[in-house]
Image (cartoon, rainbow, N blue to C red):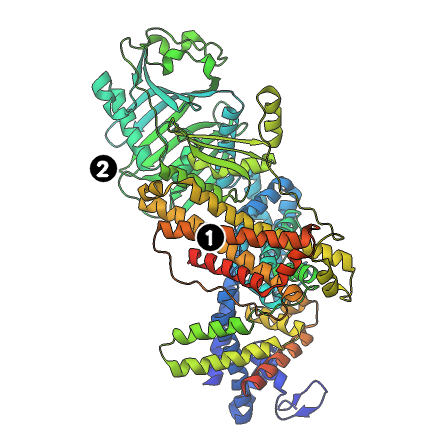
Amino acid sequence: MLLHRLRKKATTAAAAEACLEAELLDFKQDTLTLEEKVTRYFEQWRDPVNRYVVAAFGDPAEAEEITQEAFLQLYTRLHSGQSIVNVRAWVFRAAHSLAISRIRSQQFIELLDDEDWEMLRRSLVDASPNPEQRLAQIEKFSRLRTAIARLTAPERQCLHLRTKGLRYREIAEILDLGTSTIAETLYRVIDKLTQEHNG
Amino acid sequence: MDNLFQNNSGETSEHPPREMLLLFVDGELQAKEAAQLEAHLEACWPCRVKTQKVQDAIADIIEFDDQVLTPRLNPPQGWRNFDRKLNQLVAASGKQPLRSRLFGSLGRFLPSSHLFMLPRYLVRSAGVLILLALIVTLVIRLRHEPTVSASQFLANAIEAQALQTRTTPDPVVHQRLQVRRKDQTRDASVNFEIWNDTRNSRVREFLTDGNQSIPIPASASTVKDQTRNPGGDLISELEQVLKANHMDPARPLSAASYQSWHNTLQHQQDEVTRSKLPGGVDVLTLRTVPASPVNVGQIAEAVFVVRAKDWEPSELRLNVHAETGNRIYELTEDLSEVLNLAQVDPKIFGNETIASAPAPKASPQMSPASSPLAKLNPGIVPLVTQPVASADLEVEALRLLNQAGADLGEQISVKRTSAGLLEITGIVETDKRKSEIVSALAPLVSNPSVRIDIQTVAEAVAKQTSNKPTPLPSTRAVEITSNTMAAEPDLRAYFSGKGKDTDEAIRQYASRIVSLSGRAMDHLWAMKRLLNQFSPEEVRALTPEARNKWISLIRSHARSYQQTSESLRRELHPVFFPTQSLGIASEGSAITDIDDLTHLVNQLFELGSSNDRVIRSAVTSSSGGVMTTVTKTPQFWQSLKNAESLAARIAH
């Protein structure tokens, strides 16, 4: 069953990647102006990029500015005739670099402090059709929250880039690290989160 | 050896290293390694269980991400400024050089970036594709001149027409048009002209039939009875078609009218082409086809032609769906000019009988002898079209300004005059900003009850020298003087030893705080202006749609205020309130009526303004230590949270 699911997952991932590539090829046709292409890229990837910047660096107001700036840099780059093979990864990389220069000097602000968490926990309980399952889920979320808060900055960045669907080689380019380092970091993240999960 | 796995240290084992399991799950193994591992997993229970644990951990992370993190990571400003920024960048970048466009397209196919290493077979395939694409691109480029997007086409055409009226004092737009109607049974055509006094919102239409010119009353539907002219039928029919499709009967051949229809389409295909007319004139043609099937009376296809040199409209073709097959209406421009009102015969807009040629006094394109009005029917009095702007229209204007981000402190006002006009006036800093706002207001440009007058500072100053003094735009002056600010001791204590220039860190921090507080106040002022725009009675008299639109505008500003204030608190937290919990605003009960909304907005404005004063006093002036003491109190922290709760309640 597990192997079957893994095979299916691989097939689905490949199909998704093929769709993405097809979409990119479509954008590459000269039916759209550069402005329209960048606008489409923006509409398609602004949310994942923004979520990555907030989750990894922790400043929602600045993240929105950074995300927009990354797409404006994309326009400038393409307008000058320079080539970009993987636009999605390029934008993530641009946003990451901007975030490093603008936000890193500040203290990382945890997205969910204790009070936030308590309110969220209450709202999850209230919304639950099955209280027992919900409590188990909240308990799980609570442990994950603690574990994620303990991750180092590179670990947090790797994790949030991976959850946005980026492949190892893409994450490596974005963070300017080797692919094997990404693999090791991600494994370490999974290991830490699993340990926390198991108490 | 094929059954053994190697770990990072080079040691071999019959079980794969745990890292390899994650690579396998993530699809990052080479095909051979993946096959080997897959075969192992089929036989090895312990490794299968470990793999399952990795899968479970990933599932938990995704669940946490979806349910806990993602809902909290929405952008505070809702991406509202991106289009404006991109437009500015596009305008500043200019036209993309041909070399860049060719090599840009080529480059985007070529794996020349160092970002990723592509497999060799992909490189080879890409090479073939590149050659084919290059050939196709070159053929297409040789056959077609590059054109613009549909939105840019319309924006340019609207701006060109608006420019004409802006540069003429008291402008009167005069158009002479030929209208043709074709269907399966008959063809008909009529010539008519329109005089549009945009400043005073007066419109006059005349049929020109051979040697006769016949005034058309305000409602073309009555023209048949009054004039017994069959051309009246066609004008009446056209007017109904235009109205049914949200176009402007007063300016049927205009980009603004076309855009007004275009904006109603949810999905459509647009095509812009460049060609030459038989006379050698270069034209650009926009063809729009709605993607969804249309009903009877709706436009199934529209073609709008403008001259390439000045973006002036020359032709409009509407293919309208009818019960007995489609009907085609063609509007062709014979003459278009913008005159000063003083140049126009007063009888055209007056209530006097026009018995002789109006003979525009100074119209180089039109000699008095050629004027169709020279042969107007005597005894027919044109009716005065005096449209009145509604409060609903005022709300729509406010909404359009909001979309352009022009309701956050720029000196722009929207008001209805005693004469029933909706006046949108303002002074902005640059030509670009002016274009953006005029473009945002495009749906209202052709509305005869709307007067738009947006000037740049330079234009206002130039006007000031010839007219009475005009107030210049107010700017927010913020002076950050790090050596005098009240909160400096706290800031210095926090930033010293942080590894960078303490003075610079304090200055940047203070600047950031003041900027955030100012942004929050911008939203409060915007809410206050929206609230004061209408009396409670006027709000109740709005149509439900307009009222909801107005409330939505207030709510969107409340939401933005809440988010900006949260960002502000996050900045203040480590410096002034390290022991306090950040917390989030609670929404409280929902607003029940307009009075409730008014009360809450006023309350929020008072509280927010007070918070802003405390913050500014702490980090911008030398008002002593009182304010910085206030800034550090739990009461002030609570006051910030209370303001956010109020905002959350309004936005709820």
Q: Which residue is mark 2?
A: B324
Label 1: chain letter: B
- Quadrant where the image shows the C terminus of chain A: bottom right
Q: In this picture, is B561 found above or below B290?
A: below
Q: Residue B25: where, in percent of width, then height?
A: 55, 79
Tell which tag, 1 or 2, sits nearer the viewer. 1
- Quadrant where the image shows the N terminus of chain A: bottom left
The disc, 1 or 2, on the residue closer to the chain's N-terminal end is: 2
Q: Residue A176: where, in percent of width, then height?
A: 70, 67
As measured in the structure, the alpha-carbon distance from the residue carrying label 1 to the one carrying label 2 is 61 Å
Label 2: chain letter: B
Q: Residue A38: where, in percent of width, then height?
A: 56, 51
Q: Amino acid at mark 1?
A: Gln
Q: Is residue B91 visible?
A: yes
**Foreground: B650 or B459?**
B650
Q: Which residue is mark 1?
A: B603
**Foreground: A50 or B622?**
B622
**Residue B536 bears which disc, if any?**
none
Asked whether, in this view, residue A156 is left or right of residue B278, the answer is right
Q: Amino acid at mark 2?
A: Thr
Which secondary structure lies at badge 2? loop
Residue at point 37%, 27% (across, down): B250
Q: In which quarter of the view is residue B369 placed?
A: top left
